[in-house]
Image: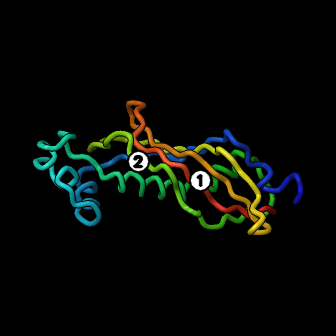
Amino acid sequence: MTKTSFFNLIDPGMTMQLGQYTFEKEEIIRFADKFDPQKFHLSEDGAKTSIFGNLCASGWHTASIWMRQNVIHGRDELIRLTKYTGPEPEFGPSPGVRNLRWVSPVFVGDTITYQSTIIGKRELPKHPGWGLVTSHSQGINQNEKPVLALNGAVFVKLD
């Protein structure tokens, strides 16, 4: 492995900006109807009597949008941050996420900014030629209030 490998250029503390997403009423209801049919996700009337008081997005919806933003922007952002100029780096699968938390509800019209910060990396002796990069990701609404937090990981080819 050379000093200029993509994996070697990744450093804890690098923060990838994954873009913004605005949650609209019809989409919140559509997602809930298909995947999380609880009254506070399905209608304004149902939400009025809930702990939230207003229609809000499913936590799974906010996490799904994080995944979308991560796939669309994460790789390019990490390449940009490392200033890597070699061959296209190879990413493997993710072994999963930990500590998924829906910190605050996401209401109709909220715009969430997603970001992911590298918190560690290590080579994988059981998988020669591969490393594991870990990150802490979050979603923050337009009022600077966190709404989503999770720790994730992804396999990255060492050279």
Residue 103 visible at all: yes
Tell me the tag on residue 21.
2
Residue drawn at point x = 10 percent, y = 48 percent: 45
Residue 88 visible at all: no
10 Å neighbourhood of mark 2: few (<14), some, or many (≥20)? Answer: some
Q: Residue furthest right?
A: 2
Residue type, numbered disc 1: Gly
Side of 12 where 64 appears, left or right:
left
Query: Which is nearer the N-term, disc 2 or disc 1?
Result: 2
Secondary structure state at the residue bearing disc 2: strand
Closer to us: 76 or 129: 129
Figure colour scheme: rainbow
Residue 84: x %, y % from top left: 77, 52
**In the rendered image, which quarter contains the C terminus?**
bottom right
Side of 80 where 31 appears, left or right:
left
Residue 105: x %, y % from top left: 31, 42
Secondary structure state at the residue bearing disc 1: helix
Measured Cα–Cα span from mark 2 to mark 1: 15 Å
Picture quadrant where residue 130 is located = bottom right
Tell me the tag on residue 139.
none
The residue labelled by disc 1 is 74
Residue drawn at point x = 22 percent, y = 52 percent: 41
Residue type, numbered disc 2: Tyr
Residue drawn at point x = 45 percent, y = 43 percent: 139
Dots 2 and 1: beta carbons under 8 Å? no
Residue 106: x %, y % from top left: 32, 43
Q: Residue furthest front?
A: 126
